[in-house]
Image (cartoon, helix red, strand yellow):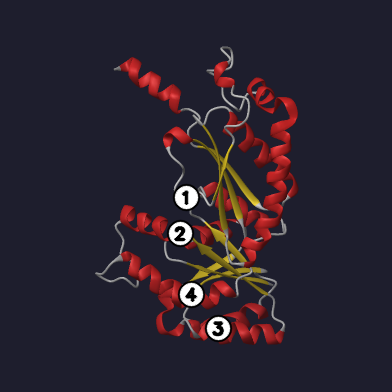
Amino acid sequence: MKLVIVTGMSGAGKTQALKMLEDMGYYCVDNLPISLVNQFTELSLGHVGESKRIALGVDIRSGEELPQLKDVLKGWREKGFPYWVLFLDAGDEVLIKRYKETRRMHPLAGMGRIGKGIELERERLAFLKESSDYIIDTSQLLTRELRQELEKIFVEGEEYKNLYVTILSFGFKYGIPTDADLVFDVRFLPNPYYVAQLQKRTGEEPAVQEYVMQGGIAKAFLDKLFDLLEFLIPNYILEGKNQLVIGIGCTGGKHRSVTIAKALYDRLKENSGYGTKLFHRDMEKDGRKKQAEGEG
């Protein structure tokens, strides 16, 4: 039998994750009282032929019983019982935004501030996050991307390294992304903007990529950047970081940054094993601006 404890911050996607696991063949139970968890597990062991995969949702709604889960997990470890803990997380600002959009009350905030409830929830769930086997930050994940990550871990059995990396291209003239952890300026590379036949194209096109990569400087930069990330990422994970946003910027976010971001994404996806996502924030902004001016 495979038992997964699905837990995490309220608003981080636990309910969605349970529904996805159910679609993957897991028997899912949400918000079972902690006092019944052991009994439920023993009953499940006796019917392993009927349901080999079980997902148990546990969160802050367990109230005063929640700390008892620490002893339950300790007992399972001592008995050699196979289980995994999946912790879903998201940034405080993202969680606050989600609560405001849904107009729901945070379970620990009452009529007070949502931020205070989130802070208190993090304190109470700290022991679960520390003992987690998998931590997924859903701050920037689409629903389908969360499903893909769960499938990799719980269906395909791929190794998971508890870090999701977002490569984000942007234009400095539109501002540095506020959520970027690392920012790299590639305005030193050849600029296709000054080549008439390339100006209206983007870094997703081979002609622009070849222009940016000419001379070997871009490749040397990518090699050094990848070496730096190979050093940094494992150390970020050791410190508990589970979401890394890497900003790659040029002037307008259309040519050079897109080219380098795409190349870095391909290399990380092929060689690192970390969950990776590519997003071009400003690639189409010039085109949309000119279209709006024309419509006006």
User: Which of the two discs, 4 and 3, labels the residue nearer the N terminus?
Assistant: 3
- Is 156 in front, or is 221? 221
| Residue under numbered circle 3 | 70
Residue 277 is situated, as x and y percent measured from the top left of the image, at 59, 45
Quadrant assignment, res 198: top right
**Spatial separation of the CA atoms under disc 4 and disc 1:** 24 Å
User: Which of the two discs, 4 and 1, labels the residue nearer the N terminus?
Assistant: 4
Question: Please, which residue is most extreme toward the front here?
Answer: 188
Task: Please tell me how crowded label 2 is: few (under 14), some (14-19), or many (20+) other residues with Cα within 10 Å.
Answer: some
**Spatial separation of the CA atoms under disc 4 and disc 2:** 15 Å
- Is 31 in front, or is 145? 145
Label 2 amino acid?
Answer: Gly
**Spatial separation of the CA atoms under disc 3 and disc 1:** 33 Å
Element on which disc 1 rests: loop
Q: Quadrant of the N terminus?
A: bottom right
Label 4 amino acid?
Answer: Leu
| Residue under numbered circle 2 | 91
**Front of the two marks 4 and 1:** 1
| Residue under numbered circle 4 | 125
Asked if disc 3 and disc 1 are in contact, CB closer than 8 Å, the reply is no
Residue 203 is situated, as x and y percent measured from the top left of the image, at 60, 27
**Front of the two marks 2 and 1:** 1
Label 1 amino acid?
Answer: Asp
Element on which disc 2 rests: loop
Task: Please tell me how crowded label 1 is: few (under 14), some (14-19), or many (20+) other residues with Cα within 10 Å.
Answer: few
Element on which disc 4 rests: helix
Q: Tell me if I can see residue 268 in this picture.
A: no
The residue drawn where x is 32% and y is 16% is: 295
Q: Is residue 272 above or below residue 105?
A: above
Label 3 amino acid?
Answer: Lys
Asked if disc 2 and disc 1 are in contact, CB closer than 8 Å, the reply is yes
